[in-house]
């Protein structure tokens, strides 16, 4: 099974630039085309589909996603509007169904089960795992105890060392860890939000964030560093299940010289 993972396109209404510096629409279109070229079994989107949560941007997203040749599992980020997201993507024929009210969770079955776990806090930038979130996840994981499972959130549960984004990570990590310890089949946690690739462990399993389609956050690890971003090349993740292990590849988006003979 191959899962293409894109995050943080931050689409804007026509005529607007993301943070006044970047037209994110062609970058998202190019990323989708490149993801489709790998013939994935599933496309997952880990939030911040739009910058402002407006209907025009969701209509733009719908146009870009409509032709994607695989099922799509998407969750919102802190820049999305939960109800506009639900309404705006409802016309996608290949969308994995979202919960009809409340947090926008979603579940895709396959050799690897994927759970979209919406931990966003409407109107704020951080996420939180509440007891209600944990109870839903516990019940969802209990329904398939033998299926290897990937859990996708928007905000990561761990600090990255980049202080200006760590202030807006997902909290309630102890609550989630207590849930996950009962479910060893949850083999990986993935997120977005950080606009960089990061990798660590959480509750004894790999946890990572996907790079952004929009600008990349500056890698400033000094305490108190000023927030900044760079227009680096976008990138995606490809999660490959070979029947025994899940391997994640980072793939830059774009056309590059090659292929060259290697051996």
Image (cartoon, grey):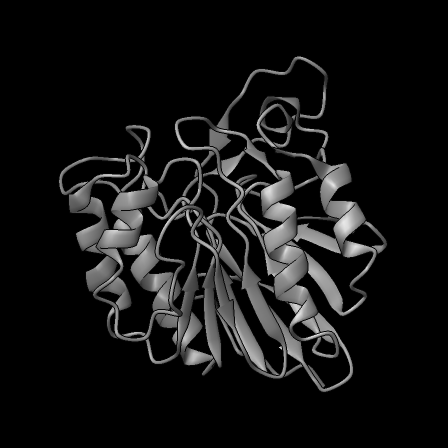
Q: Looking at the picture, how far across and down is residue 8, in whole percent?
A: 43, 46
Picture quadrant where residue 144 is located: bottom right
- Residue 149 location in percent, x, y? 67, 69
In the image, residue 53 lies at what x, y percent?
A: 28, 39
- Residue 20 is drawn in which quadrant? top left
Determine whether, in the image, residue 78 is placed left or right of residue 151: left
Does residue 171 lie above or below 73 as drawn?
above
In this rendering, position of residue 159 left or right of residue 24: right
Residue 170: quarter of image: top right
Q: How many marks?
A: 0
The correct choice, above or below, for 217 with respect to 66 in the image is above
Residue 209 visible? The answer is no
Residue 20 shows up from this direction: yes
Q: Nearer the viewer, residue 200 or 252?
A: 200
| 192 in relation to 143, above or below | above
Front residue (pair 241, 90): 90
Q: Camera-side residue: 163 or 82?
A: 82
For the point 47% across and 64% down, the residue is 44
The quarter of the rendered structure image containing the C terminus is bottom right
Image x and y of residue 173, in percent = 73, 38
Residue at the far top in the pictured view: 224
Foreground pick, 254 / 217: 217
Quadrant of image for the N terminus: bottom right
What residue is shown at x 68% (from left), y 58% (from top)? Answer: 138
């Amino acid at each position: 099974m191959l899962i293409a993972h894109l995050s943080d396109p931050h689409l804007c209404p026509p005529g607007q630039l993301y943070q006044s510096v970047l037209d994110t629409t062609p970058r998202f279109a190019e990323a989708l085309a490149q993801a489709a070229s790998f013939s994935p079994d599933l496309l997952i989107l880990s939030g911040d589909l739009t910058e402002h949560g407006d209907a025009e941007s969701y209509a733009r997203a719908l146009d870009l996603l409509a032709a994607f040749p695989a099922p799509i599992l998407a969750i919102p980020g802190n820049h999305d509007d939960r109800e506009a997201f639900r309404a705006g993507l409802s016309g996608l024929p290949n969308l994995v169904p979202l919960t009809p009210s409340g947090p926008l969770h979603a579940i895709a079955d396959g050799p690897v089960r994927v759970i979209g776990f919406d931990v966003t806090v409407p109107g704020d930038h951080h996420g939180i795992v509440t007891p209600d979130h944990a109870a839903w996840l516990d019940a969802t994981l209990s329904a398939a105890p033998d299926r290897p499972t990937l859990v996708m959130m928007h905000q990561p549960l761990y600090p990255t060392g980049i202080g200006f984004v760590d202030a807006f990570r997902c909290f309630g990590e102890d609550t989630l860890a207590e849930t996950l310890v009962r479910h060893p089949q949850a083999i990986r946690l993935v997120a977005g939000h950080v606009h960089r690739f990061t990798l660590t462990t959480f509750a004894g399993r790999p946890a990572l964030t996907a790079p952004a389609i929009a600008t990349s956050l500056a890698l400033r690890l000094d305490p108190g560093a000023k927030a900044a971003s760079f227009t680096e090349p976008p990138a995606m993740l490809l999660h490959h299940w070979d029947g025994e292990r899940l391997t994640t590849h980072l793939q830059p988006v774009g056309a590059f010289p090659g292929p060259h003979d290697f051996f």
